[in-house]
Image (spheres, helix red, strand yellow):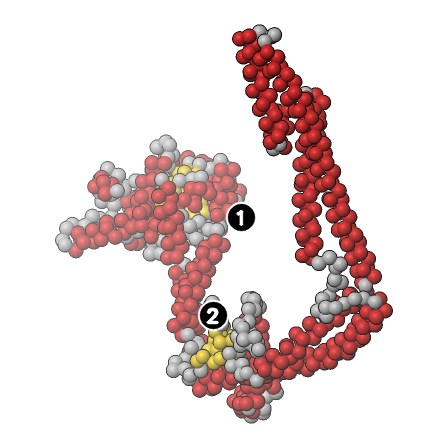
Amino acid sequence: MPTQESTLHFLDYWRIIRIRKTVIISVFLLISITATIVTFILPQYYSSTARIEINPDGGVIVGMGGTVQAGGYDPYFIQTEFSKMQSEQVLGRVIRSLNLNEEVGKKYGGGAPFKTDETIQWLKARMNLSPERNTKLIDIRVASQDPKEAATLANAIAEAYKDFRLDQWRTNTMSGIAALEDEFKAEELVIETLQTNVDQLRQKLKVVDTDPVSLNPSPIISSSDMQKYNDQRIQDEKDFTQKSTMLLYLQALQKTNAMALRDVLPRMTQDTTLSGLLDRLHTAQQSYVSHTNDYGLSSPEVIRDRSMIDELNSEIDASVTGVMVGLDSQVQAVKASLDKLTATLQGAISNDLAEASRGQPYWQEKRRLANMLELHRLLQAKIANEKVDLTIPKTTMVSVMDYAQPGKSADKPNRTLYISFGVIVGLLIGVGLAFFIEYLDTSVKTIDDVERALQAPVLGVIPQNAGYLIDEGAESQHAEAYRVLRTNLLFSRKDDKLNTIVVVSAGAGEGKSTTTLNLATVFAQTGHRVLVVDSDLRRPTLHKLLRVANSLGLTNYLLKQNTLEEVIQRTAVPTLDLMASGKLPSSSMNVLGSASMKEMISELKQRYDFIFFDSPPIMGVSDAAVLASEVDMVVQVIQYRRYPQPMNIRAKQLIEKVGGNLIGIVLNNINMSQDESYYYYSGYYHGGYYYYSKHEDETGAPAKAAGEGDTDAGRTGIKQKY
């Protein structure tokens, strides 16, 4: 299903293009031809391009240092230089060197010299500057009607810009050197003043300054000695901490567990004497235990061992006491040394601070003098460097890489591009205008428009320029369209007794009378007795089409002036009769809505198989609405692309409002050559059936007479083709 919808939309677009092809082709040709003419009228311009390389001021060569400049990337450098190239300072040089004021005045000013600002504007309009991507190269392109002039101008602009950059750099450098020299002289006066102040402060504050380079007072203790003292102090603090901690631990152990102190002390102090005594004590204790087990407590060996143990305990206690006293002495000695060293350092620092505070004005002034001397030296070197740089050629700031050459062919206008653009624009505008006109056109265009807007079926599609079948005959190329309409009408009626039909339209000129007459003709050609009533009492036309008099007709009968037999006339078709309109009354409303009209319709229904009523337009005239309410069936004719859809919708609403039985719509005057979508409704019998019939006649087959065998039962062969 989506594919079908997409194809349908495409066909709708193609249909619009085919229908509006006259507008599209006219606009297309107008714009294309105009673009072509204008392109060939425009003067031809030749372009020449000079290519230059630009760098920041000073290039990559520096003075005394001999290093490469490390200037950062400037995103605005190229655009700034573009503005300079178009400035009066650069273009003025070009104008003066080529005498452009007079030359341009002769060519474009009628002989009168141009003013400089006018020549600059003339030159700007012909030059174009463009950078080459990711390079320092710039293309200077100049367009002119004379190729030699274009090349001369491009080269002159390149040279003028190069000279301008060099002159600008030289002027700026010399101005900078002069400013630096003035600053150098001013600094010399400041240095003399600072030197005088330093000498006076040294004498006044009695500062001892033996080092002319030093900018800070010399300390009493040298930095190396200070470092050595600090290292010694740190070591003493470490020893004191370790020994005092150990002493406190041993003293606490001595108070709580004296026997444990004996075992701990030798390992912590590395005292060999105490270790030997403890070993001897352990040996004596072992001997004592052994002898006690062998000899008893009263034996001499046991007594001797006991005496030895007591003696060793006394010696160990004395040794422990001596070690503890020795440790305490060591701790006190380390503390005394640390205090002395700390006091020495604090004294030296205090003396240094006092000396520095006293001589602070002197040292500050001396530092200012040293800083000024350093800046003065750098400034002197900078001046020397700039003077040397001034003598070095700065050709790398602007280098002409390629000089412009006269162009061999014109660049502007690009005739191929302009003409192609005109063709494309003309086609787009033509198609767009066609769709815009189609958008503004709210008339009926397709069968879908009718069925969607009016909610009524389409009974027939009548091609454009359809003639009168009563003159063209049964085998007319338009006859089959009316036969299809006849067939659809017969199948649309719900009861075979419904045989009165009125043909209406919303407005005038939609082919209502033609449709009425041709439809009645095809019904008559099938052998039915048919009557056509010209009930358009405003502008009757059927009597003219059938070439009969209009002296007697419908109004004469309704006014009781004549009988039916007197007002009904015969036509060229044997089974087709006509009731003309007759004398026009002053008020057709009263006549058509009278009881006589209804009685006449009832009488005619008994006499004829089908009765067709022609009517005036239903919009603005009440006659058609009256007829729609009195007959069995109503057929509404809508002319293709004539009136807006709301008008046709309003006509349908009027029919329904009066109770008319609208059985369908007839689309009239379809242009088959433009709208190919209607081929499926009528193209077959135009290109096939009609040709086949004519061919049969030409080959000798007997052609049918009008109406002969043209009945629904006798035309089964044609129906099978559909």
Residue 404 vertical placement versus 518 (above, below): below
Mark 1–mark 2 distance (CA, rounded to whole Å): 80 Å
Tag 2, which secondary structure? loop
Residue designated by label 2: 135
Element class at badge 1: loop
- Residue that badge 1 annotates: 620
* First of labels 1, 2 by sequence position: 2
Task: Return the x and y of residue 191 as percentages of the image width and height.
Answer: 76, 75
In this rendering, position of residue 471 left or right of residue 306: left
Q: In the figure, 128 relative to 572: above or below?
A: below
Q: Image height check: is 156 above or below 550?
A: below
**Residue at x-position 83% and y-position 61%:** 358
Residue name at image x 43 percent, y 61 percent: 428
Residue at 49 percent across and 80 percent down: it is: 399
Q: Amino acid at mark 2?
A: Thr
Residue lying farthest to the left in this orientation: 700
Q: Is residue 142 visible?
A: no
The picture places residue 189, in percent across and down from the top left corner, at 77, 78
Residue positioned 27% across, 41% down in the render: 527
Along the line of sight, which residue is nearer the eye, 445 or 81?
81
Find residue 341 and name its label.
none
Specify the quadrant that holds the C terminus: top left
The residue lying toward the viewer, choosing from 655 and 676, is 676
